[in-house]
Image (cartoon, helix red, strand yellow):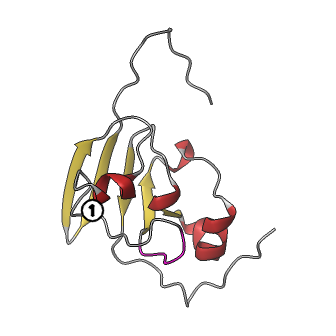
Amino acid sequence: MIEMREPGAQQSMPKIVIHAKGERHEAEVPPNTNLVVQAGIRRFPYPHLKYRCGMAKCGTCVSRIIKGLENLPEPNWKEKKVLGERMALGYRLCCQLWIDHDLELTQENLVPAQVAAPAPVE
């Protein structure tokens, strides 16, 4: 669904909740934010988000989306290649997401990549 706004109206700031090391961390981020970019410049979700390459090659930023999955765009081919069947469990790569809506995620107790077979790339 596309959100319609009046010309000149400001978009609300998405609220991000990250569960890390047994704690809940919450903050607002600017609209159209990439969480890995934010963490890279030492803004929230830093230091709570694990990340490395930012290009969907390493899979370090893999997260299970607890709330807000329905507002994210369809996974791209890079996510499909790295995540495979784990996408069905609500897993996404934070480096590939630009956030415009509230989102809750965790990087704890994730299913390892070796357990889930990769999905075929179309």
Q: Give coordinates of residue 114: x percent, y percent.
A: 55, 90
| Quarter where residue 60 is shown | bottom left
Q: Which corner quadrant of the image does residue 42 belong to?
A: bottom left
Q: Which residue is mark 1?
A: 19
Q: Residue furthest left?
A: 23
Is 27 part of what is drawn in magenta? no
Q: Is residue 2 left or right of residue 38?
A: right
Residue, far top:
7
Residue 12 horizontal/vertical position (percent): 36, 26
Q: Residue at x 49, y 78 (%)?
A: 58
Instruction: Please tell me which residue lies in front, 115 or 49.
Output: 49
Percent x, y of residue 7 = 50, 9
Reply above or below: 74 against 58: above
Helix, strand or loop for the magenta stretch, by majority: loop
Q: How many marks?
A: 1
Q: Quadrant of the C terminus?
A: bottom right
Q: Is residue 18 above or below residue 119?
A: above
Q: Which residues are magenta?
A: 56-60
Quadrant position of the N terminus in the picture: top right
Q: Which residue is outermost to the bottom? A: 114
SS class, disc 1:
strand
**Residue drawn at the location 54% of the way across and 75% of the way down:** 57
Does residue 110 appear to the left or right of 43 in the view shown?
right
Q: Residue at x 63, y 67 (%)?
A: 78
90 horizontally vs 38: left or right: right
